[in-house]
Amino acid sequence: MKQDPGSPATAPEPVDARLAARLAEPRTAHGWSLGELAERSGGSRSTLSRAERPETSPTASPLNRLCRVYGRTISQLLSEVEAEHAPLVRAAEQPVGEDRAAGFVRRSVSPPHAGLRGELVGGGLAAGTDLAYDGPPVPGPEQHIWVLEGALEVTARDVAHRLDAGNCRRLRVWGPTRFRCAGPADARYVLAVVRP
């Protein structure tokens, strides 16, 4: 059915709107104009512009070219837009894991989601707890470790850093890490993780 020129434009489907936003994010993160992205991808500036607004739903060929430029697969991109993340995560909905034997409590304050790059974790270590990790699930994520109470020793690249209450350690993680609470008090901290 032809739309009356005087009537308001039809709103895009929610999935198309999320896909458009997801397509625009990496371009703006790289600081590229639409023209620069068109040169890198071999697509047309007008097609890219319509896809980001969203005036059209891009076909597989332009999507594949964009994914190649951004270093991801089409299935990864589509999985990021299939389900919208919950904008509010209530305290009662935040998953809590506890390993009493190890003296470790972990609260997923802002759980990971395919459409988001960051997550927020609340951690608690009992005095004497020493946790070692072989490495991150993906290479090179950012970690921001903010100690709320007590003291924490964080080791990365064989260098240990003591963090007292209020201190924040920022790093990119490429290999093994270690979190240790020497005591005498327990430690509470916030860990922000941002995927590359």
Image (cartoon, rainbow, N blue to C red):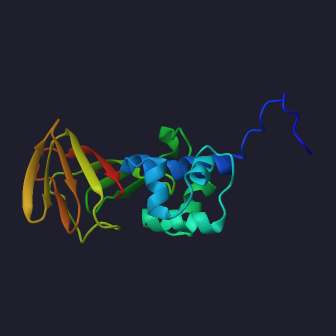
Give coordinates of residue 165: x percent, y percent: 15, 37
Numbered circles on residues, count? 0
Residue 77 appears in the picture as rendered: yes
Instruction: Please tell me in which quadrant of the rendered image residue 10 appears.
Output: top right
With 127 as the anchor, is 57 left or right in this view?
right
Instruction: Please tell me in which quadrant of the rendered image residue 64 appears.
Output: bottom right
Closer to the camera, 119 or 153?
Answer: 119
With 109 as the anchor, is 173 left or right in this view?
left
Rendered residue at 15%/53% (across/down): 181
Note whether 3 is above or below 194 in the view shown.
above
Quadrant the N terminus occupies: top right
Q: Residue furthest bottom?
A: 134
Note whether 8 is above or below 55 in the view shown.
above
Residue 111 appears in the picture as rendered: no
Quadrant the C terminus occupies: bottom left
Rendered residue at 51%/38% (across/down): 90
Give coordinates of residue 31: x percent, y percent: 37, 47
Give coordinates of residue 140: x percent, y percent: 27, 62
Give coordinates of residue 21: x percent, y percent: 55, 46
Q: Residue furthest right?
A: 1
With 178 as the anchor, is 96 left or right in this view?
right
Closer to the camera, 117 or 192?
Answer: 117
